[in-house]
Image (cartoon, coloured by chain):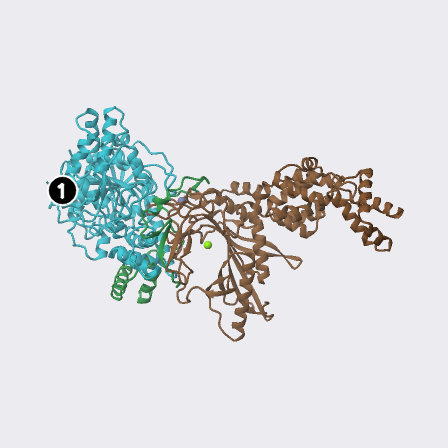
Chain colours: A green, B brown, C cyan
Amino acid sequence: MIDRKDVEHAARLTRLALTEAELERMREQLNSILAHLDTLRLVDTTGVEPTSHAVDVVNVMREDEVEPCFPQDAMLGNAPDRSGEFFRVPRIIEE
Amino acid sequence: MTTPDRYEVVIGLEVHAQLRTKSKMFCGCTTTFGAPPNSQTCPVCQGMPGVLPVVNRRAVEFGIRTALAFSCRVNPACRFARKHYYYPDMPKNYQISQYEEPLAEDGFLEIEVDGGSRKIGIQRLHLEEDVGKLLHEGTLETAQASLVDFNRSGVALMETVSRPELCSPEEAAAYLRAFRAVLIFLEVCDGNMEEGSLRCDANISLRPRGQTELGTKVEIKNLNSFRNVQRALEFEARRQAQALDVGERIVQETRLWEADRGYTRSMRSKEFAHDYRYFPEPDLVPLRLDRAWVDEIRAALPELPRARRQRFVTQYGVPAYDAEVLTQSRALADYYEASVQAWGPSPGNRGDRPKTVSNWIMSELLAALPGDDELAIQRSPITPARLAGLLRLIEDGTISGKIAKDVFQKMLASGDDAAAIVGREGLTQVADEAALSQIIVSVMAANPKAIDDFKRGKKEAKGALVGQVMKATGGKANPALVNRLLEDKLSKT
Amino acid sequence: MHRPIHELTDAYRRGDLTPTAVAESYLARIAALDERVGAYLTVVREHALAAAQESERRWRAGAPLGPLDGAPLALKDVLCTRGVRTTCGSKMLEAFVPPYDATVVERLRAAGAVVLGKTNLDEFAMGSSTEHSAFHPTRNPWDLSRVPGGSSGGSAAAVAGGLAAGAFGSDTGGSIRQPAAFCGVVGMKPTYGRVSRYGLVALASSLDQIGPFAQDVEDTALLLGAIAGHDRRDSTSIAAPVPDYMAELPRGVDGLTLGLPDEYFIDGMDPEVERAVRQAIDVLRGLGARIERVSLPTTRHSLAAYYIILPAEASSNLARYDGVKYGLRVPGRDLVEMESRTRAAGFGAEVRRRIMLGTYALSAGYYDAYYGKAQSVRTLVRREFGAAFARVDLIVAPTTPNVAFKHGEKEDPLSMYLNDVFTIPGNLSGIPGVSVPCGFSGAGLPIGLQILGRPLDEARVLRAAYAYEKATPWRARRPELA
Ligand SMILES: [Mg+2]
Ligand SMILES: [Zn+2]
């Protein structure tokens, strides 16, 4: 069972501002979903390697060659806030 | 500044080295330093929606090369993982790093301590991507905003984690120095700490002497010079000792070294423990490192600084100190050996030429060029052959050691060889007895007081006369000859 | 003029039709009808006409770029298009204009395709109904009160409704095949790695795959052929040669062995769907295929594994939307407040829910029980398919357990998730699959037959679908929109 602390921890980890009511609703929904996913416990996976890729490709590497960068304007073009050549963000208060 | 003897200090270092690849870890953007902000990025290293990473083969090669130099086990299979935390300089809000299956594990680095040497264990070595750079409008505390430059984002990094086997802040600094020398020798990192090519974090804990289990460790960030490593760890060891003395518990936390203020301060609150949510990077496939490739890299490993240092002492008979200075980079050690070779074997049994070369490099060349800057040494306007040429002119008496120093400067400025400069500027020592005698006579005539003093037993007066003669010849007179002729003349007056 | 692409290009060749006339006709239809269907988020009229004119010049000069030159296509709005906004159906990216083209888009442009616009989807491709777009829902052209399926519902509806000759979508758990079944068109998910994902905005990186929607199997082969093949920008793309899919089509199913998995005919599935699929299997038998029962017992756990893996990877992929570099920003007094408000406001309820679920599943102490376990279950699913494909050439099954449902009918997230129960195993194992129309319900709603194949065996999958399509009348039926 997920409790309120778990939900708050996850919301904080993933930077989601949720109201009290939203946190509570989220807790209920996650518990209901996880209850269904719990059937996974029934599967015997002893000694079964996890699959992280559905393909068996390995060793894909590129040569160390420089390619043209994108123009500065193109890369700053979507910035919600910028200051000259920089992206600008509000002040950082350490946690 | 020392920690009380009742505590034992336990330190481990985590070093992040920027690899000297031409392009970034996962995209083709260039890695040159100092470009205008956000001018060296692309959708990949700016973490745009839809982009995918592709591993830079050279970065893997550099990682393997370093791992082999530290006698690590290169894992036949390794993979990348995502490490999640939010920071605005990290565009995807996860860093592609390695976690469960790093590139290499279990090696060591030998460091010099108190005349002996010690092997410091290296726990793991892995590859990852760098983050961008943050500038604060004002100081971090007062800034209303921060500015982000992603040029450095995605640059290839190699993280090396030592075992907690360093026993003092001095040892930690020695480790970092030796570490840096190896990386520079391997030509995998330029070692430039000012530009951030080498960055160091430390873990430090104290335990009462005799206790076997480790104390609570504190992580210290922002140690970006040898001096700061030592100062920060000294401060932190004292801080912890004082806390333990009064029975306080050490909090496991991350602290930031404030170099200007000389203290460490807590960075993150204890309640919010890190939860990086690592999982295998689905956008990259595993690496299965081909034995043949690893063997090829091993075969091409250069002689490492420590081995080369020892060889310099035995082969060339230079003092250990000289050997250490000369092996601060591969280029400088190569330069030294090439110069010795160009000059040729010392005549007779004297064997003094290698030491002379060392003296000239240490006092003259390194005054002009940074010895750990591979490129600067390789491109030195005074090539090893030209240095040998200069030393030859001193040895055969063509010029004095003093003149040679001026010639050295002129060689540095012009790139010409010594003989050309000496010839062009008439710097050959005056060794002609007749010519010198004439000069001595006129000097003596102009300094009757000095001659009187000499006769009244003031032997220093002769020195003044020699000086006058040297001055009159523009320093070109052979000093031994001047002395003999002057004594001869003085005895006759 | 709503005809399959291969017929359009035949007409271009003969000079009976021109790419410009066809593009104008599609744009006119979009202008007239899309208000009711809601297939598009962005229509790029000027771009489309310019591309059509260039295509026309090439055809006139007798030098077309290939069988897609002048084909009017639609792209799911998760495929990055340079200079054209790419929203992912989210407020978060409402104004995001990529500075680059996805590899697939590049290849389509190089093939002379005419891109009409970007199609609607469930926000960030999370959903099975295209009701959860931040902008507007898409409606099923066969019955506007019903959903087109999802998440690539806009692309499916565009092809079904005659608003594009063909389209592309992405399939993470069935998001091409399920809407294709609901809309009565052909939809294919290729083998994972067959088509480059570069420029596809990621949902779950280890499951996502791009594929085509088409009016018939022949077009499906053409569209797949244009985008398939290795891409050095996608490390997970497979460096295998791409067969000539068109040449493979006429080879029929005579002599092929088709597997019929017990687990794909479940209690609670729509009997009309079951009947249609069983009849389709009879048709294939009649065409010379051998039918064999196979067992894929882990199928029933696939959904649970999928709903761990997908949210976990999605929570990671969506971490980048923080108001710093692009997309929405909601102001805050400091960085954390700005980011947290931006993410809360920019993501819809379903996206927030999955991000939270994934964050939780990956967080300290839960990884092994959830993500690790799910990845091991995935291994079992792969093994079972491997064992089945050692005995049979293809697997045939229903695409979905039911036909298109009504808007608002599935409020509960779990009942929505159940829609993908037959398509998810194909994503977990990475194998290719197609959904091809196989009949209609009593209410006139399309039903889809799913054909799954061995990794990289798209050619055989298409071959069976083609044989079936040729032998049945379904593709002649069109929804009445006008
Ligand atoms: Mg690191
Ligand atoms: Zn880049």
**Does mark 1's beta carbon lie closer than 8 Å to ligand 2?**
no
Q: Is B173 left or right of B485, judged from the image as shown? A: left
Q: Is B429 left or right of B307, judged from the image as shown? A: right
- Residue C392 position in % (x across, y down): 30, 40
- Residue C377 position in % (x across, y down): 34, 52
SS for tag 1?
Answer: helix
Residue pictured at 78% horizontal, 51% vertical: B464
Which chain does tag 1 point to? C
Q: Is B98 left or right of C219, judged from the image as shown? A: right
Q: Residue furthest bottom?
A: B246
Q: Name the quarter where the N terminus of chain B is drawn.
A: bottom right
Q: Out of C60 and B477, give the one closest to the viewer.
A: B477
- Residue C362 position in % (x across, y down): 36, 57
- Residue C439 position in % (x across, y down): 16, 41
Residue pictured at 15% horizontal, 49% vertical: C146
Quadrant in which residue B410 is drawn: top right
Name the amino acid type tagged 1: Leu
Residue B279 visible somewhere in the drawing: no
What number of labels is visible?
1
Disc 1 designates what residue? C33
| Label 1: few (<14), some (14–19) or many (≥20) C-alpha neighbours in 10 Å | some
Residue C94 visible somewhere in the drawing: yes
Q: Residue furthest right?
A: B492
